[in-house]
Amino acid sequence: MEDTVRTPRPRARRWQHLATLLAVLATAAGSIFVLLAEPGVGAAARTWYVTVDGDDGGTGYYDSPLATIGRAVQRASSGDSIRIGAGTFHESVQVYGKSLHLKGAGIGETVLDGARVVSGFVADSDGRYSAPWFTNFQRTAYDPSVPHVFPDRPEAGWPEQFFLDGVQLAEVTSRSAVGPGTFYHDRGGDRVVIGDDPTGRLVEGSDLSWGLYFNNAHGSSANGLSVNRYATEERHMAAVRAYSNDLSLTDVEVRDNARIGLSIIGDRVDVFRSLAVDNGYMGMHGHRATEVSIRNSQIIGNNREVFDPWHASSGMKITESQGIMFSGNTVSENHGPGFWTDLDVTDTVIKNNYFRDNFRSGVEIELSSGVIVVDNVSTGNGEQGVWVLESSQVDVWHNYLAGNERGVWVLDGPRGDVNDVTIGNNVLADPSSANMLVAVDDWTQDRNANMMNVSLDGNRYWTSGSATGLLRWSNWPASLTINRTLEQIRSHHGHEAHGQAAVGGVNPFTTAQFAGAPVPARVQAVRTTSASTTVPSTTTAPTTTAPSPTTTAPTNPGPTTTTPTTVPATTAPTTTAPTTTVPVTTTTQPPQRFDRGGWTSPGVVRGDSRPVRMGSRSAGASPVAGGQLVAEAVAEVGTDPVDAGWRSFAEELATLLGLGR
């Protein structure tokens, strides 16, 4: 959060926001249909072929493929397609000034890799091992005015990366600190020093700074490829830069990159069924973007290097943008907020996502307006399930918010007024510490919740007894009101006419057989409108029944190369509440949480403060298809996702919650 002069926000009509949102959805539907269609308009368009054993002097036809993607891009004309075979391509590729369609063999099959083999190691006299290494990447230093990097962790801003048998080594700041599992880049001596004996093992280092750049390449697409292990410098922003209009990125993976995985600056960009995993700073980023959709994707374990999570690092952060659709995604274990809007983001829908175990809030809405947060699951996050900070026209409805520091926090401040926030039909369950389930505050102490026009109705509150109350309410100039019961909320503030509450025992709010409060038309319109004409073939479209609090999880089957199918026609809303079950939050394994130094977990001992990775994240593996996430899926869902046809944890939750029934 950056200090600025407080400026009153105009109280725009919500229906103007709704009209913009629906227009965005309709435009996205048409745009995505066109982008996913077979490219090659007119007789001039052709397909180029690239294989690892090709020849850049070849014709580029099927029987004479090229050897590099860059050469194919150079020779192709606007409208052409480039088919890339399975294998690893060590290159940086820019598509500039033309519309091209890159099609790989699939995530983990076609890989743009920023790392190469390191050879020439010798055993040094101090028991360490060193080899020649000549990169000189731009480093981001600590700057108190722009605190991206902690002063006690400068190596977070150093792009160098090395891998031992495919496992990333932790960087240290001096040769004397090198031990097993770590490395030091001696830039003065042009050598890399590691603590493990490399004999008979594969050591690789990242010597390229970026992987794929769509630059003024309007109408292009990428499908079925990975962009991994680039030593991303700050000036290059991300391993993949989508800086064009009308782009489609489907089944694209960005993993183990030093800074940001994917950065978006442009209009009508669609990211579908993709992965952003274990990137050093941020999984995805958006800035000055319009009508962007992030759908059915996974954003997991980002800010691996522990940049300052209170400044920008997160699963995904988007700024100065309009018309964002964030739907059907799994966002977990990021060292920062899961999904973060900031600095004048307007007309945004966040629906059907699963936010879990992020270091800060699952969802953070900061200095934004016209945002609808609906049908999400947000659990186990270090701060709020949903945080509304200095924002206006925000609707938080039908979400399952459990085990967070608090369920919802609405906070007014000096940079912009909170206005018109509705909180309805949510399940607000046991906070992780002795906090209110909902809080409405003003840190400047000059406005109260009534002036902010905050309203609550139809919410269901449950606490095992650890919470200090249900609702904290800003009453300036009087003292804060602490409401411990629904009766107090009703008598003190006139809210929650349709609410319910329970204390102790087991959470009774595990089925959505509760009509709750009437859903605002603007929210219901978003719930019953699809973001595109296509969904993954194994996924059912969200139910359109109202006004049931569906507490839905994302309908995310994981990245595949399955051809999308058409969404079935939606039915008119009714007043019948379907029986839908919310997830059980108990797991068979201790939860892993971030502290400032990295993930910690009971029983896990680390010799350094680097993050402990959860589950299997080898190239091409879906993070939700192995390791702890499957174990948690078994515990929470009660059926093995593998036996259910390799459906992801998110899809299992969607099935459990009754989507499409």
Image (cartoon, rainbow, N blue to C red):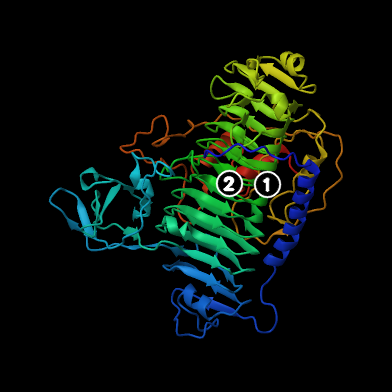
Which label sits on residue 630? none
Crowding at dot 1, Cα within 10 Å, few <14 / some 14-19 / many 20+, comes out as: many
Closer to us: 162 or 315: 315
Q: Is residue 638 visible?
A: no
Which amino acid type corresponds to the residue marked 1 in the rendered image?
Answer: Thr
Q: Determine whether, in the image, residue 187 is placed left or right of residue 214.
A: left
Indicate the amino acid at tag 2: Val
The CA distance from mark 2 to mark 1 is 40 Å
Give percent across and percent down for residue 601. 42, 32
Image quarter where the C terminus lies is top right
Q: Is residue 533 rendered to the left or right of residue 64?
A: right
Residue 570 percent location from the top left of the image: 82, 49
Give the residue displayed 50% in from the left and 75% down from the top.
50
Q: Which residue is mark 1?
A: 346
Q: Residue at x 29, y 57 (%)?
A: 201
**Secondary structure category for the residue under label 1:** strand
Image: 300 above or below 42: above
Question: Dot 2 lies on which element?
Answer: loop
Query: Of discs 2 and 1, which sits in the foreground?
Result: 1
Q: Position of residue 40 (x, y in %)?
A: 66, 77
Work out whether residue 380 can be spotted: yes
- Report the residue marked by disc 2: 642
Going 50% across and 84% down the picture, which residue do you hit?
A: 64
